[in-house]
Amino acid sequence: MRALWPTGPLPIATGTVELERDPDDPDGVTVLVNGVPSSYLDLADPSHLVFEYMQQMAEVIDRVGPAGGPLDVVHLGAAGCALARAIDAERPGSRQLAIELDTALPELVRGWFDLPRAPALRIRAGDARAELEKLPDASADIVIRDVFAGDTTPRHVRTREMVAQVARVLRPGGVYLVNTADRPPLAGARAEIATIDRCFADVVVVAEPGLLRGRGYGNVVIAASDDLDLLSSSALARGIRSLPAPARLLRDEELVGFVAGAQELRDGPPLT
């Protein structure tokens, strides 16, 4: 039986969690962690992704491995497991691990929503980097990082040492997908891109055009792989252009210019 949904903010170890029904869709619900929208779930259609950055990530995921075939996926940051639900629906037989810092949130989410059960989806409480370091070499097709403390991502999951751990866990040809958020001049996003670029053969970036022109605050999706064909495919560019919300894909020389002068992030105190 599904657990009763809270009628307001519910205390958890890292703050509060709240469920907000979509006034325009009786099957839609947003999971808010500390007041920030962290997941949107369509209870009738697990494959339906509403957050734009998840739609962008899904375009990359669609091109990993045989079409429709199962994948081994690690999610760093779980919240409502919206993307994990979509992958399970689109890629039957996939094995997924979601790591969530808050010890209470995973069990609450399982009680509220019809999430896939182990081994299709395991949810583990713990720090994203610490748990990633425990995983075997070459054990995942995709690692997805969607880790936030408020509106920022903790530094220890952004450094070159962290990216090296991701590369170790990925199989040859695997993909690292990152959701970061920034505001102009996008110094943080540029530093992350420069850091990831030093560990992978190919990197592309997807963001809303206005954000890249210096307006507002928003998500920047970074995709990285050692498979030179996967991210450079024209099919991926077409898929990004076909999404409901305008998005721009940066790669090759355009991306080199975008990150020019950015310094990679390393463990230890920030350089001053």
Image (cartoon, helix red, strand yellow):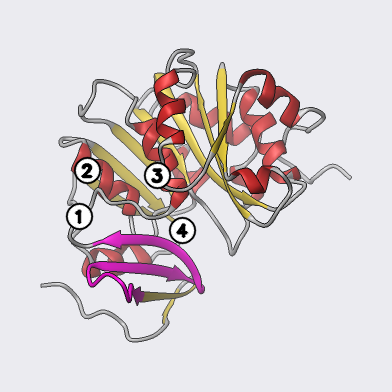
- Magenta stretch, main secondary structure, is strand
Which x, y percent locates residue 21?
32, 75
Residue type at mark 2 is Asp
Q: Is residue 241 left or right of residue 1?
A: right
At horizontal 26% and vertical 79% (from top left) the residue drawn is 5
Judging by the rendered image, the residue that carries numbered circle 2 is 88
User: Which circle, 1 or 4, is nearer the viewer?
Assistant: 1
| Res. 104 visible in picture | no
Q: CA separation, marks 2 and 4?
A: 22 Å
Instruction: State which quadrant residue 160 falls in.
Output: top right
Dot 1: within a 10 Å radius of its alpha carbon, few (fewer than 14), some, or many (20 or more) residues?
A: few
Which label's residue is closer to the chain start, 2 or 4?
2
Front of the two marks 3 and 2: 3
Query: In the image, what residue type sits under mark 4?
Result: Leu
> Is residue 243 covered in magenta?
no
Which comes before the other along the chain, label 2 or label 1?
A: 1
Label 2–label 1 contact, CB within 8 A: no
Instruction: State whether residue 17 is above or below residue 53.
Output: below
Residue 131 image offset from top left, x and y in percent? 44, 44
The residue indicated by pointer 4 is 101
- The type of residue carrying mark 1 is Asp
Estimate how packed mark 3 is, as few (under 14), some (14 to 19) or many (20 or more) residues with alpha carbons within 10 Å.
some
Which x, y percent locates residue 250?
A: 60, 29
The amino acid type found where label 3 is placed reads: Gln
Q: Marks 2 and 1, how far apart in space?
A: 12 Å
Q: Earlier in the sequence, mark 4 or mark 3?
A: 3
The question of residue 41 being in magenta is answered with yes
Mark 1 → mark 4, Cα distance in angstroms? 27 Å
Q: Name the mark on residue 55.
A: 3
The stretch in magenta equals 20-42
